[in-house]
Image (cartoon, rainbow, N blue to C red):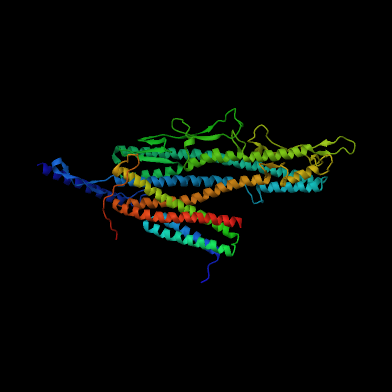
Amino acid sequence: MSNLIASMMSAAGALNAYGQVLDVVQNNVANASTPGYADQTEELNAMQFDPSQGLSGGVTASQVLSSRDQYAEQAVQQQTTLLGQAQQDVSSLTSIQSLFDVTGTSGLDSAFNNLFQAFSAWAQTPTSTVARQNVLTQAATVANTFQQTAQGLQQVATDTSHQLQQTVTDINQMSSQLAVYNQQIMNGDRNDAGLDAQINSTLQQLSQDGSITATQQSDGTYTVLLDGQTPLVIGNQAYNLSTATVPNSSTSANPQGPPHLSVLAYDGTDITSQVTGGQLGSLLNTANTVLPGLVGDQNQSGSLNTLAQQFASTVNNLLTQGYQTDGSDGSAPVAGVPLFTYDTTNSTNVAGSLQVSSTATPSQLAAIDLGPPEVSNGVALALSQLANPTDGTGEINGLSYTQYYGGIAANVGNLLSNATNLQQTQQSSVAQAENVRQQVSGVSLDQEATILIQFQQAYEASSKLITILDQLSDDTINMLSTS
Amino acid sequence: MPAAPAEERLAAARAEVRRASELLVDASPEALQSCHGALDRAVSELAGFRSQCAAAPPDAGALSTALGLRSEILRAARLLENLAAFYRGWERILGTMSAGYTARGDAAPVARQGRLYCRG
């Protein structure tokens, strides 16, 4: 009797397993063109047969292949996160780089060159009203260009803040959608392949915005965490993120400086430092690291403001140490006046507020260095030498103003170049991960073992060649750079 | 047959590495075998470029091509490491699913029985 029951149990188990296989095949056919759908396979495993122990033998379905599909989905999500980050980096840095022209045809580089030429022409004809007027005109252009660059960076900061809010809104919407999907699973749709495809598609979209970890629970629902710590979805509950502006400390160096942006978890906890990946991580990096390096924050002035402040104060110092007249007509010598004005109460607003003094006139420009010995164009000469300083005056960290500006522009250019290269690589990496997902979803564990062995051999051989190429190309670049 | 100009060999090396990257995106074992061939040819072209440089210094454009080659190599390396990380990670998971953990807490090696798989 017990043997008969065991046989019946075995037959029922086999029918159940084969039934699942048929369901899986039907799902694969029905969802062949569904975005995000991965072929499902049902592997049949032999169960132990021992009637005396009540073990009925037969076959049962395995969870291993499902786990592998989940793992492949996670690999796609991870690469998508890196792609989202690189794409946003390229977008933000392209906007910033457009403000730093180093071709000499526009922007600060051109404005500096024109002003230094005007100083030089004035030094040659120190009493010429035309030359003096040209100095004022070119100085105004420099000041306007500093202002425009600062305003442009302010616009990038504003855009970044809006994009951050939009990204958080998108994350919250997708989290809510996933919570709805989880509710459907809890209602009994766990084996709905169409629902599974929708979930994976949503998770991949979500991974572009941030670094997420999605794990399937024993009840079939997905728990989604941001950067492995902050809950976005648990069961049928979504946990919304929000954004905030971090107020500057009143005791900081620049309490009026541009504030940092932050992302808050559902309970108000500041999670900014944890967020490193995806579009969200890129936007926070632009807002809190890249832009402050240029226009400052509560702790730093920013390189653009440093340049504006040092340049304006050096020009003003030289002019105010000089004289408009030397007193040779019996009157008292008339000292020079400063050329530039700027906000002296906020070191992060120097570039944005720089302008030529509204009261400055050509005749007030002081060309004379009384010495002794008196030099009638001494100040104008000193100003023209700011183009190529030789004695430390007109230098920032050992660099001339144009070199310092070139360094700022080169830094932005390098960041953009690296981000562009990474974006291209990540596009390939996402395509690769999607191909791998496609390939493993239809492969049995036996086939997989063979593929792994083949891959291992090919990897070791290719890896050695990559190392050789890496060294050879480094040496080649060094050789070509020094030749 | 006369040797190709030095710059052409550098460009050829770059093209071979780009070809290797395209194959790595496909990621099948067959593609990986072909990738090895492409990388091997790239090494050969680059070595040829360097030896020809000793005889006739290349023009300024060669540096730009070399920098492009460097980017292609980094891309290929990244793609290869992606694949290795994927399979290593899955092996660890499979090990824990099939054999648990070692005494040190690492994933146990995958216990594969002596089964043969033939593909036509």
Q: Is A7 on the left-hand or right-hand side of A384?
A: left
Q: Where is residue B26 in the image (x, y as percent from the top left)?
A: 40, 55
Q: Which of A194 and A371 is in front in this view?
A: A371
Question: Which residue appears at 87% of the width and 37% of the height?
Answer: A327
Q: Is A469 on the left-hand or right-hand side of A365?
A: left
Count of marks, rendered view:
0
Give the answer, above or below, for where A284 lies relative to A267: below
Residue extending farthest to the right is A330
Question: Which residue appears at 78% of the width and 45% of the height?
Answer: A381
Residue extending farthest to the top is A251
Q: Nearer the viewer, residue B3 or A428?
A: B3
Q: Is A18 on the left-hand or right-hand side of A405?
A: left
Give the answer, above or below, for where A179 lies relative to A450: above
Residue extending farthest to the left is A1
Q: Which of A432 and A131 is in front in this view?
A: A432
In the picture, the quarter occupied by the C terminus of chain B is: bottom left
Kindly tell me whether residue A387 is visible in this rendering. yes
Q: Position of residue B45 (x, y in %)?
A: 50, 62
Q: Position of residue A380 (x, y in %)?
A: 78, 44
Residue A201 lies in quadrant: top left
Kindly tell me whether residue A194 is visible in this rendering. no
